[in-house]
Amino acid sequence: MSYEPPTPPSRLPTDIVNVLNESTPDRLRDVATYAEALAEHKEREVRLEEEADQDEVEERPDDLPDDVPAKATITIKEINDNRYYYWQWREVDKVTSKYKGPVNPDE
């Protein structure tokens, strides 16, 4: 019984398909993990940019530190199986984060 390899998405460039086809299973898993994290990062950047473009600035939350702009949003990051809140905002061409505190496990 012979198994056929999966068909790559038509939007994927041929040079990337060729590199992936020549990669080991471990490398492919590393690529998949990185690609998923990169996609999340880029989606977050777009979301932050869209939020920054809103005309109306919301009231400044009481717990917002003085060095964090009012346009900042709260993001949850997972580090070593622990979840933390971070203030996050865009400054020109980069996204800036500042630690807020741990996520309550009951939330």
Image (spheres, grey):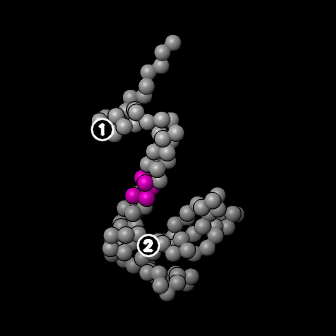
- State the SS at label 2: strand
**Residue 51 seen anywhere in this rendered image of the structure:** no
- Residue sitting at 44 percent across and 21 percent down? 4
Residue located farthest toward the right when viewing the structure as drawn: 106
In this rendering, the answer to whether 56 lies above or below 80 is below
Q: x and y percent of residue 54 in the render?
A: 35, 72
In this rendering, the answer to whether 83 lies above or below 26 is below
- The quarter of the image holding the C terminus is bottom right
Q: x and y percent of residue 88 in the render?
A: 47, 71
Residue receiving disc 2: 96
Left or right? Give the position of 98 relative to 81: left
Amino acid type, residue under disc 1 in the picture: Asp
Q: x and y percent of residue 56 in the render?
A: 37, 77
- State the SS at label 1: helix
Q: Find the magenta span and give its range.
A: 38-42
User: Which one is nearer the viewer's eye here, 10 or 19?
Assistant: 19
Q: x and y percent of residue 26 in the render?
A: 52, 39
Residue receiving disc 1: 15
- Residue sitting at 33 percent across and 70 percent down? 93
- Residue sitting at 42 percent across and 52 percent down? 39
Q: Main secondary structure of the magenta part?
A: helix
CA gap, disc 2 to disc 1? Answer: 34 Å
Could you tell which of marks 2 and 1 lies nearer the N-terminus? Answer: 1
Classed neighbour count for the residue bearing mark 1: other residues with Cα under 10 Å, few (<14), some (14–19), many (≥20):
few
Left or right? Give the position of 72 relative to 18: right
